[in-house]
Image: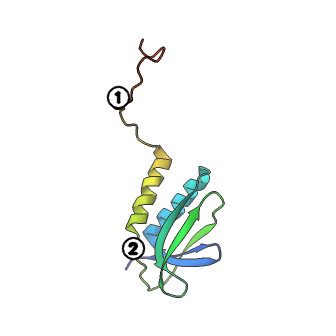
Amino acid sequence: MDRVKRISFADRTILIDDETSDCLIEYAALLGAEQSADTVRICGIGQDGDDVEADFVLNAASNLIAESTHSALQPPANPEAISYMREKINLLRVGPRAQPAEPEEIPHGVPGIDEI
């Protein structure tokens, strides 16, 4: 059985799986360090025990906590949210990869460049 964590954000809590929780916390911390912001939709189990979708607004002022639980409930998976956050985490850590320019995108006739 997968582990479950309780995420507390503002005055609400949601139960989500460990992998989603770990990504959400890491992404929130990186966004805060970069003075950036984003939103992420996470599926989980709400305070009433029903499946819910929660939209998290993450920025430098975000206060959230993840804590372990002994819950036997199985929250829904979040493969799209995890993939999205991991991609963004990677971009924040290493930056975007350089892509070669198409020949038509290279400026011509710019002073100083044609001599190179």
Name the residue located 43 percent from the left edge and 65 percent from the top edge: 81
State the SS at label 1: helix
Q: Quadrant of the N terminus?
A: bottom left
Nearer to me, 14 or 112: 112
Image position, residue 107 (x, y; %):
42, 24
Disc 1 designates what residue?
104
Residue 92, horizontal then vertical, whole percent: 50, 49
Q: Quadrant of residue 3?
A: bottom left
Q: Report crowding for label 1: few under 14, some 14 to 19, many 20 or more residues within 10 A (C-alpha).
A: few
The answer to whether residue 21 is visible is no
Mark 1 or mark 2, which is nearer the start of the sequence?
A: 2
Question: Which quadrant of the view contains residue 18?
Answer: bottom left
Question: Vertically, is 93 above or below 114?
Answer: below
Outermost residue, left side? 103
x and y percentages locating residue 108 in the rendered image: 40, 20
Q: Which residue is mark 2?
A: 77
Quadrant in which the C terminus is drawn: top left
Taking the image as shown, residue 107 lies to the left or right of residue 59, namely left
Q: CA distance from mark 2 to mark 1?
A: 44 Å
The front one of 108 and 87 is 108
Element under disc 2: loop
Q: Is residue 91 visible?
A: yes
